[in-house]
Image: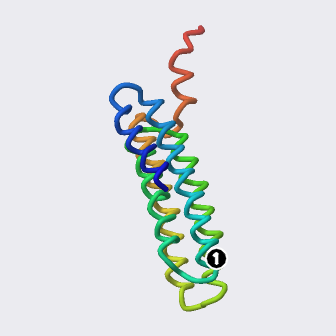
Amino acid sequence: MLQAVVAVVTGAVLVGRNRDAAAGAWRTAALLAFTGSTFGMAHAGWSQLGSWQAVLTSPVVVTLVASAVFDQSGLMWIGAIGAVEWLIWIGAVVGSSSGWATEVIAFGVGLVGLSVLITQLRRHRRGTTTGAIVSLHEHDHSP
């Protein structure tokens, strides 16, 4: 997890100089956090809710929000991968305790809602609802 923190700091330092390099550092940080959380859950036990699920939740949400703030589609896809991983691992907890089912479903819906919101924010920033397709046609000057 320390490597993930170092990658986040590296991205923060680079964001003013090279946004693509910063996004690369943040993608790496997210993947390291997802991997570290998975190993933590494996060590603590899959079927019990613990701090490792929260540790996994944080980089998923932060990655999705950062993808909108910095307009980085790569971060969005990494966040989506993290959300899928979260649903898989939290499913083990729900499978062993039905009391958590409502909370997990609500949070899963929240992650989907966050993803939709981020998509809308990105489209709004571009000033279009069709993204790159419109920008390609704007440069087409054929008669």
- Identify the residue at horizontal 45%, vertical 45% (top origin): 67
Q: Position of residue 97 (x, y in %)?
A: 60, 90
Is 22 placed left or right of 86 in the picture? left
Q: Quadrant of residue 44?
A: bottom right
Q: Is residue 61 above or below residue 77?
A: below
> Dot 1 lies on which element?
helix
Is 57 placed left or right of 92 in the picture? left
- Identify the residue at horizontal 57%, vertical 50% (top origin): 31
Q: Position of residue 18 (x, y in %)?
A: 41, 26
Front-most of residues 31 and 113: 31
Q: Position of residue 37 (x, y in %)?
A: 55, 64
**Which residue is the site of mark 1?**
91
- Identify the residue at horizontal 45%, vertical 43% (top origin): 7
Q: Is residue 100 above or below residue 112?
A: below
Q: Hey, what amino acid is under mark 1?
A: Gly
Colour option used? rainbow
Q: Position of residue 99 (x, y in %)?
A: 54, 91
Q: Quadrant of residue 82?
A: bottom right
Front-most of residues 61 and 26: 26
Q: Residues within 10 Å of mark 1 (few under 14, many from 20)?
A: some
